Image: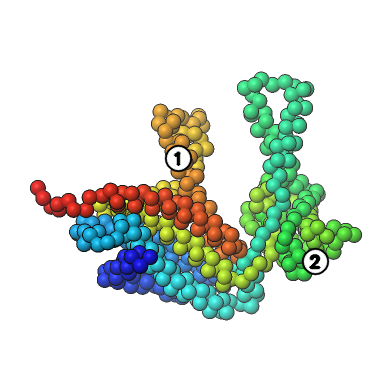
Amino acid sequence: MQRLFAIALLTWKAAFRFRLFLVIAVLLLTSVVALPILIKDDGTARGFTQILLTYTLSVITALLGLSTLWLSCGTLARDIEECQMQMVAVKPIARWQIWLGKWFGILSLNAALLILSGGSVYGLLQWRATKLPEAEQRILRSEVLVARGGAKEKNATEDIQSDAEKILQERLRQNPVSRADLPEVRKQIIEQVKAAYQVVQPGYQREWKIDLGLAAKSVRDEPLRLRVKFNAAQKSRSGTFIGVWRVGVEQKTRLWQSEPMSLAPDTFHEFEIAPNLLDENGRLTITFLNLPENNTALLFPLDEGMEVLYRQGGFGLNFAHGLGIILCWMALLSAIGLAAASFLSFPVAAFFSMGILTMAFSTTTLSNVVEQGTIMSRDAESGAIGSSALDAVIVPFFRVALEVINLARNFSPIDSLSSGRNITWTELGLAFSQIVLLLGGIFAVVGIFGFSRRELATAQGTQ
C-alpha cells in the first residue's frame, strides 16, 4: 500500500504542477455556484430544482468526466512517451502497483473535487430554498429535498400473459388460424388484455391495490403522496380531465376522497393523501373515477401510471449517496483512460476513450438497432425495414454492448435526487459492485496486462 500511495502522491503532484486541479476546481465552482446565482429561477419548486440541482449535477458529471478521461490518458501515456516512466519502473515496484497507484491518485483527485463542488451545491440549495415563497418551500421540502421510497402495484405481466393465452386457446377452438399468423394473433390479444388493465372508460373506475411491504409500519401514521400519470384517447378543450380519487376500503380502513381534480395528460402529478389509510396487511387501495363528462377513455400505463411515495430519510445523506454513484462513474472512466494509455499513445488513447464514452451516450441508437435486428433504416415510402450483410456481426455486438453499458447507466442519481427518490445503501453498493469492481475491474485487468507487456526502453525519435 505504501508503494500505491507513493504513485498516487506523484499523480497529485503532477496535477498541481500542471495546475489541472486548480483549473478544474475553478471551472466547477464557476459553473455550479456563480452561474446558478446569476440565473434566476421562475420562483417555483420545479424551476428551482431544474436550475439548482439537475443543472449543477449534470455539469459536475460532464466536467469531471472529460477531465478524468484526459488526465487518465495523459498521466500514463505522457510519462511513457517523455521517458519519465523508465525512472519509476526501475525502482522496486511492480507494474501493476504503478497502474493501480495512478488509478487511485486520479480517483482521490475526483473525490476531492466532488466533495468541493458537491458541498458548494448543497449549501447553495439550502440558501436559495429560503428565498422561495412559503408554499413553494413546502413543495420543495416534500418532493425534492427529501429521500422517498416508492411502491407500485404488483407486476401484471404474468397475469396478462395468462389471460391472453386463455383467450387465444378459446379463439383457436372457434376459429383456427395458420401457424404463420399465430404470433400476430397472440400479440393482438396481449395488447387487448393489457388495454383492459390500463384503460378507464368514462363513468367507470380503476382500482389499484399496492402493498407497502416492510415500510407499512413506519409510514402508517404519516401522510403519503400519490404520483400518477395517464394518457388520453382524445384531447379536451381545456387540456385537462376531471377525476375523483378515493383511498381506503369501506368498513376496513379509513376512507379519503378528493375533490374533483383537473389533471393534464402525459405528465406526472403528485398530491398528498391522509395518513392511516392502510389495511391490516399494509396494503393501500386506491380508486380512480373517470367522470362521464370527460367523454374519453383515460389510460394509466402499467409501469408508471400509479406509485405511492413515502418518506424514508433526509436529503443530506441521500445527496451524499448520489455523489457516491457519480464517483463510481469517475472510477470507471479513469480505468478506461488508463487502460487505453497502457498500450496506445496519448492522442490515440484519448480518441479511443472518447469513442467509448460516445457509445455510452448512444444507447437509443443501439436499442433501435437491436430491436429492429438490422442497422438499416425504415423505408419512407413502403415502411419496410431493410437488411444488411453486416447485421449478423453488428447486431449481436450492439446487444452485448448495450447490456454492458446498462450496467453503469441503470443508476441515475441525478434523476433520483431531482425527484426526491431515496438512493439506498443497497443501490450504492450495487453501483460500486457493477461499475467499479466489475466494469472497472475488466478495464484494469486489460490495462495492467498491456502495461506489463509494454516495452518502455525503446529508442525515441530514431530514424
Q: Secondary structure at mark 1?
A: helix
**Lateral position of residue 245 relative to residue 12, left or right:** right
Residue drawn at the location 56% of the way across and 64% of the way down: 417
Image mark count: 2
Amino acid carrying label 2: it is Asn
Outermost residue to the right: 251
Q: Nearer the viewer, residue 121 or 344?
A: 344
The numbered mark at residue 420 is none
Find disc 1 in the rendering and name its residue: 398
Find disc 2 in the rendering and name its residue: 276
Quick check: 459 above or below 219? above
**Lateral position of residue 25 relative to residue 432, left or right:** left
- Using the rendered image of the protein, determine whether residue 413 is visible from the camera's viewpoint: yes
Q: Nearer the viewer, residue 426 or 315?
A: 426
Where is residue 271 drawn, in percent x and y?
70, 64
Residue drawn at the location 52% of the way across and 37% of the way down: 371
